Amino acid sequence: MKNIEQKVKKTLEKMKLSQKDKILVAMSGGKDSSVTAYLLKKFGYNIEGFHIDLGMGSYSKRCLEAVKKLCKQLDIKLHIYNIKKEMGSSMCYIRSGIQHEKKGLKNCAICGVIKKWIMNREARKLHFKYIATGHNLDDETQTFLMNILKGSPQLSANSGIITRNVKDKKFITRIKPLFYVAENDIRKYSKKMKLPVVYERCPCALDSYRIQMRQFTNSLTTKEKENIMKNFDILFPLIQKLKTEEGLKYCEICGEPSRNNICKMCQLVRVRKNR
Ligand code: AMP
Ligand code: ZN
């Protein structure tokens, strides 16, 4: 258990954050982001919680309850974004509407774009310097391998423990304190600390390619996963050089930072331009 704490501490030290900087922890109610919040608080960082209520029936209700309980235990403020209230319908509805027009788009890909867009905008509105997510060693190994198998290592250029290379006043830097911690160790730690957590996966997580990749990474030892990510660390400077695109622009529709004239979110959903 000490091992996990030391790993996270070391990762955080590498980021060179100040303990005063405001960090918004994106808390889904799952074990990874709950352990992220727990450890950041334990190490004395200035955190608050952020939860997107996706409005997906009893699963979402249990996630919200778990997040509320943990924030109370940690004595941190919780910001809740209710997608039904803010966007008019639940994630399931928004997603099936998109999939009706754009066939073949995966559930997790759509949900991921929408969640990232919301997180960046809300964290900026609330004046946070960082957004912390619960991405772990298994997630990162899968993503790195998927990008390699696609023949596009440059897609990993914005990965890493901190998004240092994206500099824009409207883009909130993202950090991943659990980047080097294996999923199994996080599960054990969260059970040992008796954190209020929803252990089941999201009922809509049907991204077949990632599931395939997860089956593969589940067959690896922690050491092997660490070794894969050692390759990532060594190759990272080279991968960054492969990036061809210019810096960030602002989306013509919503005004959010984007790599293209229209951001990924607005390519999926029409949103009002404000802020
Ligand atoms: P996922 O894309 O579901 O694997 O989630 C990646 C990370 O995004 C999690 O570790 C959380 O930090 C964050 N996250 C996912 N879902 C939510 C949510 N509903 N509310 C707030 N943060 C979330
Ligand atoms: Zn946009």
Image (cartoon, rainbow, N blue to C red):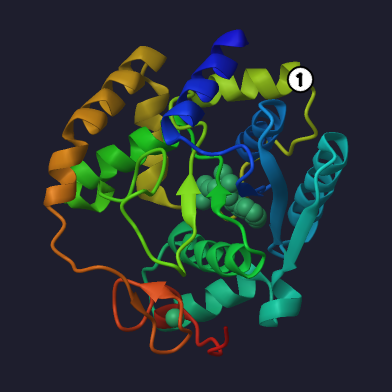
* Screen quadrant of the N terminus: top right
> Residue at position x 68%, y 63% from top?
54
Residue 215 pos. (x, y %): 40, 31
Tell me the quarter of the picture where residue 265 sits.
Answer: bottom left
Residue 258 pos. (x, y %): 36, 73
> Residue at position x 53%, y 64% from top?
120
In the displayed structure, does residue 180 sit left or right of residue 73? left
In the displayed structure, does residue 26 sit left or right of residue 179? right
Tag 1, which secondary structure?
A: loop
**Which residue is more in the foreground, 70 or 145?**
70
Mark 1 nearby-residue class (10 Å; few <14, some 14–19, many ≥20): few
**Which residue is more in the foreground, 154 or 48?**
48
* Screen quadrant of the C terminus: bottom right
**Which residue is more in the foreground, 129 or 69?**
129
Residue 185 seen in render: yes
Vertical placement of residue 41 versus 85, above or below: above
Vertical placement of residue 225 versus 178, above or below: above
In the displayed structure, does residue 101 sit left or right of residue 240? right
Vertical placement of residue 216 versus 167, above or below: above
Vertical placement of residue 152 versus 231, above or below: below
> Residue at position x 17%, y 34% from top?
235
Residue furthest top in the image: 2
Residue 31 pos. (x, y %): 66, 34
Amino acid type at image mark 1: Met
Say whether mark 1 is within 8 Å of ligand 1.
no
**Which residue is more in the foreground, 23 or 57?**
23
Residue 274 pos. (x, y %): 57, 87
| Count of numbered circles on the image | 1
Question: Which residue is the site of mark 1?
Answer: 193
Residue 30 seen in render: no
Tell me the quarter of the picture where residue 149 sits.
Answer: top left
> Residue at position x 48%, y 85% from top?
254
